Amino acid sequence: MWGGRYASGPSAVMQQINASIDFDRRLFAQDIAGSKAHCRMLVDQGLVGAEDGAAIQDGLDRILKEIEAGTFEFKAALEDIHLNIESRLAALIGDAAGRLHTARSRNDQVATDIRLWVRDAIDGLDGQMRTLQAALIDKAERHAATVMPGFTHLQPAQPVTFGHHLLAYVAMLGRDRGRLADCRKRANESPLGAAALAGTSFAIDRHATAAALGFDAPMENSIDAVSARDFALEFLAALSISAIHLSRFAEEIVLWCTPQYGFLRLSDAFTTGSSIMPQKRNPDAAELVRAKAGRIVGALTGLLIVLKGLPLAYGKDMQEDKEPVFDAADSLSLSLAAMAGMVTDMEVDEAAMEKALLDGFPTATDLADWLVRTLGMPFRQAHHATGRIVALAEQRGCRLADLPLDAMQQVEAGISKDIYSVLTNAASVGSRTSFGGTAPVRVREAVKAARERYL
Ligand code: ARG
């Protein structure tokens, strides 16, 4: 491979540590697209003859078909995807194959391939996030008026609608998609033509290859072009944040499927049984989504550390960028698919949600707000009076709505029977009509707005 200077091949361990073909074969389509664009440009610039150029194009097309058909033989001795394809091209078309690498290095080649791959992955993940948003929005519409306890500190806080809770994840996914779009914008510049690091003495046209590959522009500095991997870091950071979002939702699914909550039920399609306890129905898919966040964040920290202190321009260290990028993309893709499946599959137990609202005095804030609104009390004073009323209800073991009027009047003489109108859960959620609030009317509006914005 290394021409005149090398008399013997690598040791077995050298080959093992050096070869990347087992994982970078995933770049075959991007590698061939990059080579075809480079070859066309070389011909157009008069750097390669038209006949050789045509033979190269034809050979690359054949190699693409061989790889897609599974008949291509990948060889570890040929190190990576670039040399595997180049070697096969030589076998197919002979000496003309050697002209393809004019004004190019594997350094700009691999940087181009991985950018193209990340760009495709972003487009795929964006579509999957949109699909999950669509599933959430449909569920949210159906449950725009389904009341459940909203939690802070995992303690019952105030009644909310289940639809409103689901739309919180739609908003998070909207920002996740925005982060991917930002990353795509910065990643979409072409390193091709930077060659090893310094550019080339041949009269190439980097603008032409950039345009042919759908890049917005050639990268402005050849040293940066081959050594930059911040696009991969941004990609992994965006995936990490999204994975964290999914893990929070997954944890809620796990909790809510327990008999203690009983808010949700997943079907046989998204649960597993136990080999010893016949009653079990375990939410394994949700647990695995919760766990995948670990490896995705691991991919980000792993690559950050690979790049830390790495001198410019190219170092073989950078070959270690691929596995974390591939693994994180695969893991998030699977997580998004599993979440979309679970959201569609989940059955909501409205009675269990209602029942959970019996505990924890979730309409205490509504009582305090009534004191402010009706009696003109400062909120802090109303908060104190409500606390005393809650204590009375606690002593009697009853809900606020069941506390007799005279008991409340002991605390605050101005309270009238109108107070009961704000103590039901339906009244509570119905009253929260502020923009972005949980009232069913607002949730229905938000569903409509989300469809327009995201779908
Ligand atoms: N397989 C290598 C990588 O993934 C390709 C670039 C090799 N360049 C070099 N100068 N050895 O980074």
Image (tube, helix red, strand yellow):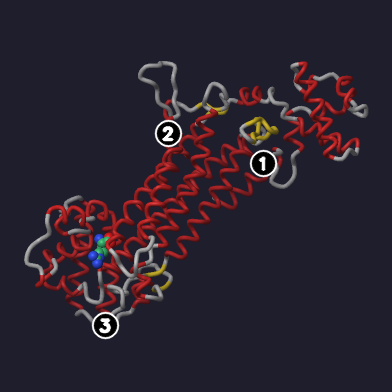
- Number of other residues with Cα within 10 Å of mark 1, as a class: few under 14, some 14 to 19, many 20 or more: many
Residue type (three-letter) at the residue carrying disc 3: Phe
Q: Earlier in the sequence, mark 3 or mark 2?
A: 3
Q: Is residue 131 above or below residue 255?
A: below
Q: Is residue 210 above or below residue 324?
A: below
Disc 2/disc 1 C-alpha distance (Å)? 28 Å
Q: N-terminal of the two: label 2 or label 1? A: 2
Q: Nearer the viewer, residue 220 or 184?
A: 220
* Beta carbon at label 3 within 8 Å of ligand 1: no
Marks 2 and 3: in contact by CB < 8 Å? no
Asked whether the beta carbons under mark 3 and mark 1 sit within 8 Å of each other, the answer is no
Disc 2 residue type (three-letter): Ala
Apparent side of residue 423 relative to residue 353 in the rendered image (left or right): right
Q: Nearest to the eye among marks 2 and 1: give it.
A: 2
Quadrant assignment for ligand 1: bottom left
Quadrant (top left, top right, bottom left, bottom right) of the N terminus: bottom left
**Amino acid residing under circle 1:** Val
Q: Is residue 126 left or right of residue 406?
A: left
Residue at 19%, 63% in the rendered image: 83
Q: Quadrant of residue 406?
A: top right
Q: Secondary structure at mark 3?
A: loop
- Residue identifier under label 2: 285
Q: Which residue is mark 3?
A: 202
Q: CA distance from mark 3 to mark 1?
A: 62 Å
Residue 294: image x %, image y %? 42, 43
Measured along the vertical axis of the image, is residue 216 above or below residue 160? below
Is the Cβ of the residue at disc 2 closer than 8 Å to that at disc 1? no
Q: Is mark 1 within 8 Å of ligand 1?
A: no
Residue, x 83% and y 26% (percent of image)? 420
Which residue does the numbered mark 1 point to in the structure image?
A: 443
Q: Nearer the viewer, mark 3 or mark 1?
A: 3
